[in-house]
């Protein structure tokens, strides 16, 4: 049976590998508007810093796709899905037949909507070309303003600071990464960035971007006044790239709606990765996850379903962020927690925050705590009900806190 994949990222690369490993011998076609699949997480870190080239980010060598008999349609954009004819239309008028279609189109940056948003020197970071463009404008001693204090904003802030720029981060909430980590973790990273010379302004509303006579951004206007800028990086979240699915009449709601098998409302079409909204049996609600781990695991799920083994997708997700020499790892989803317990001493740059809901261990934030995060994956999946007093005692191993 022929398989067509729209989107050439982490999910697509893993799907190809899983299909072939599970014995799928049919045709596989990969459509993507960039080049060969590559890792995106390093774009804000080592790639932006010039420490890694694009060849080091590639998920598979070009020869791999020949060996696996994958037809490549790279640098081509899919424009429409004809569900009745089971065809994908591409830019230029070409069509592609399929028996199984997998949409793995990922996500795209949320754009600023304010005066000056289209000025030169305003950057978003999603692709290697975005990072290349940004790097050409990095100059020691010049001023960078980052709008948004989430993962991307803080990672870019750390990298630009290491490259010698003066960096200011503007966050509208009262702490950085406020949607994804506990307050102790936010405050820790605020202090770490400050110790490296990054200025973080919290509770700030951005009103407009100001330009010079050449049409280039020169300042960010906020509710506290204007901040000079030689460049601006916007990191205010991402949106699912689901326009193809919507136009094809597939159910969409904060992403492409799929069932527990990663199938869309059309049984011949699956959706995986950042663009998919799937049910989590573990957490009892629908989620759309922006993580490499989720893309990887959903790809495996779809491969098993296509090759004849009905498999439900239900995994405890995990996420990470590298800033300076600190590794933040998050396991699980903390939404709805009623207790957060600190383990360890932040002064030692190694600690965790455990989240409980009705006594159940549902998530953990770890900073430079590899043992805790590794143990937490199994404990959260098994719905452990730990002793809160033991959790707070760093001398007790996490696995022994039951």
Image (cartoon, rainbow, N blue to C red):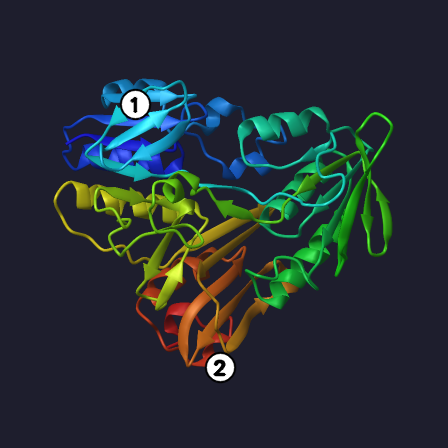
**Marking on residue 246:** none
Q: Secondary structure at mark 1?
A: strand
Pick the front one: 45 or 102:
102
**Marking on residue 389:** 2
Residue 144 in view in this figure: yes
Pick the front one: 114 or 93:
93
Is 101 situated left or right of 130 in this image?
left
Sequence-wise first label, 1 or 2: 1
Q: Residue 172: x percent and y percent? A: 71, 58
Mark 1 vs mark 2, CA separation in Å: 62 Å
Is 226 situated left or right of 399 in this image?
right
Which quadrant of the view contains residue 205?
Answer: bottom right
Which quadrant of the view contains residue 11?
Answer: top left
Name the residue located 24 percent from the left edge and 52 percent from the top edge: 261
Q: Secondary structure at mark 2?
A: helix
**Marking on residue 95:** 1
Is 37 situated left or right of 15 in this image?
right
Query: Count the marks: how many?
Result: 2
């Amino acid at each position: 049976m022929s398989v067509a994949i729209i989107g050439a990222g982490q999910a697509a690369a893993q799907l190809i590998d899983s299909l072939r490993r599970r014995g799928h011998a049919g045709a596989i076609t990969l459509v993507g508007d960039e080049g060969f699949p590559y890792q995106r997480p390093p774009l804000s870190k080592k790639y932006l810093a010039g420490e890694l080239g694009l060849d080091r980010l590639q998920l598979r060598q070009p020869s791999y796709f020949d060996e696996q008999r994958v037809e490549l349609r790279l640098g081509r954009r899919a424009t429409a899905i004809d569900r009745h004819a089971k065809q994908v239309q591409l830019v230029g008028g070409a069509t592609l037949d399929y028996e199984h279609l997998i949409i793995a189109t990922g996500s795209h940056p949320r754009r600023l909507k304010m005066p000056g948003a289209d000025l030169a020197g305003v950057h978003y970071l999603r692709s290697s070309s975005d990072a290349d463009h940004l790097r050409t404008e990095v100059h020691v001693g010049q001023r960078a303003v980052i709008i948004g204090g989430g993962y991307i904003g803080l990672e870019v802030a750390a990298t630009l600071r290491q490259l010698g720029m003066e960096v200011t981060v503007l966050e509208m909430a009262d702490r950085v990464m406020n949607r994804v980590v506990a307050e102790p973790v936010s405050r820790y990273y605020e202090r770490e960035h400050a110790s490296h010379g990054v200025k973080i302004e919290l509770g700030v509303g951005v009103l407009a971007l100001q330009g010079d006579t050449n049409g280039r951004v020169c300042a960010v206007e906020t509710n506290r006044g204007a901040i000079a800028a030689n460049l601006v990086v916007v990191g205010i979240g991402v949106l699912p790239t689901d326009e193809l699915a919507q136009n094809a009449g597939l159910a969409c709601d904060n992403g492409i709606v799929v069932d527990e098998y990663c199938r869309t409302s059309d049984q011949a079409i699956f959706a995986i990765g950042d663009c998919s909204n799937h049910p989590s049996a573990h957490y009892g609600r629908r989620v759309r996850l922006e993580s490499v781990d989720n893309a990887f695991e959903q790809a495996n799920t779809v491969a098993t379903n296509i090759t004849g083994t009905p498999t439900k997708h239900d995994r405890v997700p995990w996420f990470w962020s590298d800033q300076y020499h600190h590794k933040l790892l998050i396991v699980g989803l903390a939404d709805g927690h009623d207790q957060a317990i600190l383990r360890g001493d932040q002064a030692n740059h190694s600690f965790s925050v455990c989240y409980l809901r009705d006594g159940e261990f549902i998530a953990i934030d770890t900073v430079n705590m590899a043992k805790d995060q590794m143990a937490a994956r199994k404990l959260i999946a098994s719905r452990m009900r730990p002793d809160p007093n033991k959790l707070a005692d760093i001398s007790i191993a996490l696995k022994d806190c039951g």
